[in-house]
Image (tube, rainbow, N blue to C red):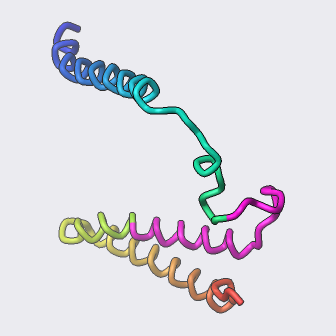
């Protein structure tokens, strides 16, 4: 048990110092910074004008389709990079399973493209 504590003691010290430093800096930002909100500071800044409709309006389905397609192809890149790095040391099963994965993603992309989901009109 003593060996485990000796191994992790430096990590615990760093964690404690980081926590104390974060709390001190957070508190100092409230003490030192001037808290004087005016009309310009609290005005709408994201789009330049005040919102004129309810924020709970429904979105077009195409927004969600684009988001899902982005996630799919982002995951493809996340799987493709380690596979490409270790390509010289993997077996043929690893090669063909990634080939199958890429083939299924390509077929799905062609399907979505042919269905017109990528058209924005």
Stretch of the chain drawn in magenta: 49-77
**Above or below for 20 versus 38:** above
Q: Position of residue 115 (x, y in %)?
A: 70, 88
Q: Nearer the viewer, residue 67 or 92?
A: 67
Residue 42 drawn in magenta: no
Q: Position of residue 39 (x, y in %)?
A: 65, 48
Q: Position of residue 108 (x, y in %)?
A: 58, 80
Residue 50 drawn in magenta: yes
Q: Image check: 109 left or right of 10? A: right
Quadrant (top left, top right, bottom left, bottom right) of the C terminus: bottom right
Residue drawn at point x = 77 percent, y = 68 percent: 59
Q: Image check: 53 left or right of 1? A: right
**Above or below for 65 versus 11:** below
Q: Nearer the viewer, residue 51 or 120?
A: 51
Residue drawn at point x = 55 percent, y = 84 percent: 107
Q: Position of residue 7 (x, y in %)?
A: 17, 19
Quarter where residue 32 is shown? top left
Quarter where residue 85 is shown? bottom left
Q: Nearer the viewer, residue 65 or 16?
A: 16
**Above or below for 19 versus 92:** above
């Amino acid at each position: 048990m003593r060996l485990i504590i000796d191994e992790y003691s430096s990590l615990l010290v760093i964690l404690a110092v980081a926590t104390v430093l974060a709390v001190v800096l957070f508190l100092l930002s409230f003490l030192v910074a001037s808290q004087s909100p005016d009309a310009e500071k609290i005005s709408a800044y994201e789009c330049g004008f005040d919102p004129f409709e309810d924020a709970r309006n429904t979105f077009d389905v195409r927004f969600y389709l684009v988001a899902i397609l982005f996630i799919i192809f982002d995951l493809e890149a996340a799987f493709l990079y380690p596979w490409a790095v270790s390509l010289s040391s993997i077996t043929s099963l690893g090669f063909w399973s990634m080939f199958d994965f890429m083939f299924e993603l390509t077929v799905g992309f062609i399907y979505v493209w042919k269905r017109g989901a990528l058209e924005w009109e």
